[in-house]
Image (spheres, rainbow, N blue to C red):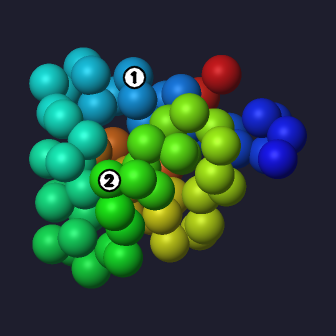
Amino acid sequence: MRRDANLIGRNVARLRYQQALTQNMLVARAQVLGCNITQSILSNIELQKYVATDKHVFFLAKALRVEIAELFRP
């Protein structure tokens, strides 16, 4: 997979670190909201090895308590 196929990974990691969340904590938040995501999937999204689906984008933004556009900031 091309790294430019995943535009949100670095921002998800940045926002998670800023909020002092572990990957497991963020996964738990997203799962409570109804997202089918695992720590492995989140790790691969952050490393830009996995293409985030539209559902992942939606639920990760909600779990991080940010607007979706924040995940796409350059």
Name the residue located 65 percent from the left edge and 43 percent from the top edge. 49
Q: Mark 2 or mark 1: name the one nearer the start of the chain.
A: 1
Name the residue located 60 percent from the left edge and 57 percent from the top edge. 52
**How many numbered discs, if any?**
2
Identify the secondary structure beneath mark 1: helix
Mark 1 crowd level (few <14, some 14–19, many ≥20, 10 Å Cα): some
Name the residue located 53 percent from the left edge and 27 percent from the top edge. 10
Check the image and name the residue furthest to the right.
Answer: 2
Residue 71 horizontal/vertical position (percent): 51, 39
Residue 53 horizontal/vertical position (percent): 60, 66
Three-letter amino acid code at disc 1? Arg
Three-letter amino acid code at disc 2? Gln
- The answer to whether residue 40 of the structure is visible from this angle is yes
**Which quarter of the picture shows residue 13?**
top left
**Which quarter of the picture shows residue 29?**
bottom left
Q: In this view, does 29 lie above or below 21?
A: below
Q: In this view, does 27 lie above or below 10?
A: below
Which residue carries the number 1 mark?
Answer: 14
Which residue carries the number 2 mark?
Answer: 39
Could you tell me which quadrant the C terminus lies in? top right
Q: In this view, does 71 lie above or below 61?
A: above
22 or 69: which is nearer to us? Answer: 22
- Decide if residue 12 is on the left or right side of residue 64: right
Residue 61 horizontal/vertical position (percent): 38, 52
**Which quarter of the picture shows residue 12?**
top left
Q: Is residue 71 above or below residue 36?
A: above
- Looking at the image, is mark 2 or mark 1 nearer the viewer? 2
- Decide if residue 25 is on the left or right side of residue 23: left
Mark 2 crowd level (few <14, some 14–19, many ≥20, 10 Å Cα): some
Name the residue located 36 percent from the left edge and 76 percent from the top edge. 36
